[in-house]
Image (cartoon, helix red, strand yellow):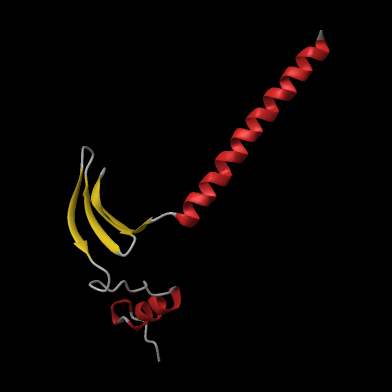
Amino acid sequence: MTGTYIHMAAALAFVILLILAGGFFLKKRQNRFGLMSIVGYQSFGPKKGVAALKIGKEILILGVTQNEMRLLRVFKDGELELSETGDFHGKLKTFRSSRHFGIDSR
């Protein structure tokens, strides 16, 4: 009787592991071949903001609220240049060159 319970628990654990492994691999595959990626998001309060999504060769600017998402603008390929945000050292150099804090970069 106890052997039956152990066998049933082992089979259940195996099925749960198969479901988790399948979900993991499907998520990895979706991220690698996904057509949509989030370029940036700027929050303007609780559950309000503007999002930039890259879908294929277009960049969509969306207004996001608690109740809706509204398309604000679509940029075609080559119409908008996405610049990389500066690295930490570049930001630190800019901060150090600021004279507001009495720091001189000489």
Q: Quadrant of residue 6?
A: top right
On the image, the x and y values in percent for residue 86 come to: 38, 75
Q: Is residue 90 above or below residue 10?
A: below
Q: Quadrant of the N terminus?
A: top right
Residue shown at the point (30%, 82%) measured from the top left: 99
On the image, the x and y values in percent for residue 71 come to: 19, 52
- Residue situated furthest bottom in the rendering: 106
Q: Quadrant of residue 40?
A: bottom left
Determine whether, in the image, residue 44 is placed left or right of residue 12: left
Q: Quadrant of the C terminus?
A: bottom left
Determine whether, in the image, residue 10 is placed left or right of residue 98: right
Residue shown at the point (55%, 40%) measured from the top left: 23
- Residue situated furthest top in the rendering: 1
Q: Nearer the viewer, residue 56 or 69?
A: 56
Determine whether, in the image, residue 105 is placed left or right of residue 49: right
Residue shown at the point (22%, 53%) measured from the top left: 62
On the image, the x and y values in percent for residue 98 come to: 31, 80
On the image, the x and y values in percent for residue 63 come to: 20, 50
Residue shown at the point (58%, 46%) measured from the top left: 25
Q: Quadrant of residue 59?
A: bottom left
Q: Is residue 70 above or below residue 96?
A: above
Q: Is residue 68 above or below residue 77?
A: above
